[in-house]
Image (cartoon, rainbow, N blue to C red):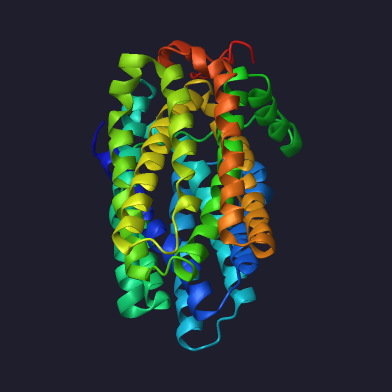
Amino acid sequence: MGPDFSRLWTALGASAVGGQISELAVPLLAVVVLHATAGEAGMLGAARWLPFLLLALPLGVVIDRCRRRPVLVAADVVRALLTVGVVVLAVTGALTLPLLMVAVGALGACTVAFEVAYQSFLPTVAGRDQLERANGRLQATSSVAEVGGPGIAGLLVQVLTAPWALLAHAGTYVVSAVALARIRQPEARPVRSGHGVLRDLRDGLDHVRKDRYLVSLVGFAGIYNLFAQWILVLFTVHAVRQLGLTAGLLGAVFSLGAIGAVVGAAAAPKAVRRWGAGPVLVGCAAVECAALLALPAVGTDWPRPAVTAVLVLAFACNGAGTALSSVVALTIRQLRTPDRLLGRVNATMRWISYGVIAVGAALGGLVGDALGTRTAIAIGCAGSLSTLVWVACSPLRSIREPQDLRVVDPVPGHTGDRGADG
């Protein structure tokens, strides 16, 4: 796939490592340093994901109207500066929970732009015939970051405290920006549709709405993400205050558990060839949801090794399912969408599938405050099982080979994919 894909790969790998550091450092900063309650932790999680709900759709229109690489570089630079700002406020004692929420929300806005732009930029760098391979490599790298990132984060938090751990995250954004700036692949200026913003926005929504496979993928991601975030936003609080895990041990649990995600991402091409994309997606939905049921079952009086072993196994099985299904789902989405609509379609999918994460975080925090973290996590786990029902009843179950879904863009002068029923 060439050196430019390697540069994009490096950038996304650096961002993934940094994301794993902040995934643990930010909640611990809120819980340990700012003494956040379960409800406040939920609101912090909502602030992180709310930009996907508010900004994904308009940013999708913008990204389809400009070259994507400059957007990626700018997003990384701004995120680095914002993260350094949080560190400065924290070490000077000026950081408050409302300020942290504002900073997390601003970082989330930049992440929306980065996520939508990179998924739209990937076919330009890798080529559409190599999408499954490219997505598999990127997902595997993200999964490797999940192995090392939480452990590094836990160690940094324990040794340096949470604020200084975030400084390492700022450094990964700089690495990503430099790698992206070195990409040499020419990127054609997008052809303007000649329509207004609202019309362009509606075209992206309509493409998703009229394609039964894309609708099915939205439901898969939306239902699962809502309940998964409900569970995870409470788990950090529960693990520290009820199970007595230290920052280092909590990071180790996430790191060891993420080995499953590495295996799942690496196995995606072979699994699809052997069983077909549909059965793989149904199986992944079953595994990733069933694995979460172990979290509320862990007893506070269990020996520490038993607690650690069960949690690692649960996160490993969950990670394997989510990584494998993510590779297959993203490949299907890119094959079903022409390049001229990729920004808007990716934004539409992110708007729904990531927007509900903010809802899940807020709901999980509220239920956790009302009923306690263990009961609230159990309710979230029960709700997540509806994901399996959705996937098993959707057209996704009958897909054999993702490339069979690829069709030609009917608009003259463009190449790409368009849903046969869209």
In front: 301, or 79?
301
In front: 165, or 380?
380
Q: Is residue 128 visible?
A: yes
Residue at 55% over, 24% down: 391
User: Residue 408 at x, y = what percent?
Assistant: 51, 12
State the image quarter where residue 103 is shown.
bottom right
**With 194 as the anchor, is 303 left or right in this view?**
left
State the image quarter where residue 21 is shown.
bottom left
In front: 129, or 108?
108
User: Residue 138 at x, y = what percent?
Assistant: 34, 39
Residue at 31% over, 15% down: 274
89, above or below 185, in the image: below
**With 30 as the anchor, is 179 left or right in this view?**
left
In the rendered view of the protein, which quadrant contains the C terminus?
A: top right
Farthest-out residue, front:
301
The tally of labels here is 0
In the rendered view of the protein, which quadrant contains the N terminus?
A: top left
Farthest-out residue, bottom:
92
Residue at 36% over, 50% down: 310
User: Residue 321 at x, y = what percent?
Assistant: 40, 35
User: Residue 19 at x, y = what percent?
Assistant: 41, 57
Q: Is residue 184 visible?
A: no
219, above or below 225, in the image: above
**With 389 as the anchor, is 118 left or right in this view?**
left
234, above or below 259, in the image: below
**With 72 as the anchor, is 304 left or right in this view?**
left
In front: 175, or 401?
401
191, above or below 90, in the image: above
Residue at 65% over, 66% down: 39
